[in-house]
Image: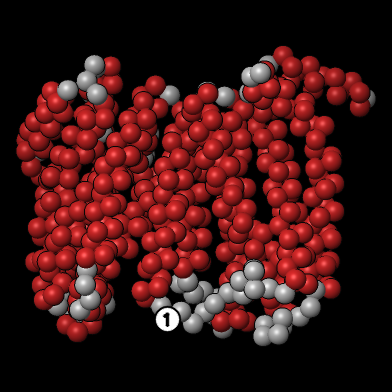
Amino acid sequence: MGQGFSAIFYRDLLLAFRHRGEIANPVIFFFIVVTLVPLGLTPEASRLAQIAPGILWVMALLASLLSVEGLFQSDYRDGTLEQLLISPQPLYLMVLAKVLVHWLITGLPLTLLAPLLGMMLSLPKAGYLPLVLSLFMGTAVLSLIGAIGAALTVALRKGGLLLSLIVMPLYMPVLIFGANTVQRAVDGFPVAGPMAIMGALLAVSLLISPFATVGALRVSMHG
Amino acid sequence: MWQWFHRLGSPRWFYQASGKWLPWLSLLAAILLSVGIAWGLGFAPEDAKQGNSFRIIYIHVPASFLALAGYYVMALAGAVGLIWKMKLADMVMKSAAPIGAILTFVALVTGSIWGKPTWGTYWVWDARITSMLVLFFLYLGVIALQYSYTSQDAASKSSAVLSLVGMVNIPIIYKSVDWWYTLHQPATIKFTEAPSMHPDMFHPLLVMILGFYCFYAVALILNTRVEILNRERRTRWVLDMLLNSKKGSS
């Protein structure tokens, strides 16, 4: 049963490392848009510190959103997706493997880069650990939810903008709890509550989202 | 026992049956709406604090009710279409989306007009307003997906999947927006809650809500009938009906 999972996991990881430039893109995007914020707003450290939690979270969300579009695209174009759908392996696990790889090559680097950008936005000290932890879980939820949108729009020629349109409302709870975890930590409140809710969101989307993605993939392939 | 269920799946049967319900339902909606409007705008007592401006509640509250109920109608129709492959359910889902979006828009606009005299501003990032806005985005997503496919079947199925995902998410979104709001904003702004309303104000509101439900049903049926004719335009029964109606009128 784990055969399909590990095969897809290994294959996608290999493919990702053979296109290293594509791995770097979301991270560079994240870097650049965060740089735009002081340019557009203010270089003043005290004001940047106030908005840093929200900015970092919104930008990480956008970076993850932009990269999720390609999740099924190449597999759809070269017919791999068709083969996956007719294979006897459980689709749920194969989709989970693809999402996991997507998270490893986008969500995880974004999470690791966030403290550096936090420093550049003069995020107060108390915010770093909650920022990393909330992004660690939150980007996984974003990948899982984004996969549904990617599966729904994979057969469309210009699916990119539509994908953001349908997925962003579903991202809102993650953003609210993620940014608030950091904000609360900065303000000196305990963060166990919102962090636990973040974990709950992750658990629920782990259970439900691959099913919806599988359904959406079937619709996209067979009409 | 399941015969009625199978009959319901036939667009032709629905078209003919709904033609018979439609006059009665429209009449009921018209009566309820005109009684409710006249009662609410003309006879209900003035609010002690808000004066006459509170009367927009008679449009605002029913529209918000149906905006949310309409999403569930759409998602459930989508589920029925996915599970039992019922053509009619797909058509109902497609027809419900724009009606729901318009009602959500009406709720947002009336809310913001009401906000001006009450809170002194057209837009407040209040929990309810924000969740209404998210609901509007969810509707727009379903409509956009619906129109981006060339194949009608794929469009129906994919927007059904999306509206089901949205339905699972709506409670989560509402709860999280509530939580976000209580963290960020001082809870100074309070709506006049329905249960705390005076009965003289509440009864016309009840009539309006019922009227809106009937109106929603009428709009949904009308929209679905257009969709049926559009999709079945090459079938025998539609052609026969059109030819007969032409003969009758000339």
Give the side of residue A165 with respect to residue A74, left or right. Answer: right
Q: Position of residue B79 (x, y in %)?
A: 50, 33
Q: Residue at x 26, y 30 (%)?
A: A92
Q: Considering only vertical position in the picture, is A150 above or below B56?
A: above
Residue A3 location (% of width, % of height): 13, 23
* Position above or below: B12 against A200: above
Q: Image check: A116 left or right of A202?
A: left
- Disc 1: CA contacts within 10 A as few (<14), some (14-19) or many (>=20): few
Which quarter of the rendered picture does the C terminus of chain B lie within? top right
Asked if one can make out residue B199 in the rendered structure from this viewpoint, the answer is yes
Which residue is nearer to you in this view: B173 or B12? Answer: B173
Looking at the rendered structure, the kind of residue marked 1 is Pro
**Numbered disc 1: what chain?**
B
Q: Position of residue B88 (x, y in %)?
A: 62, 28
Q: Classify mark 1: helix, strand or loop.
A: loop
Q: How is the image coloured?
A: secondary structure
Q: Which residue is mark 1?
A: B186
Vertical position of residue B177 compared to residue B10: above or below: below
Q: Does any portion of residue B147 appear in the rendered image?
A: no
- Residue B183 shown left or right of residue B240 in the figure: left
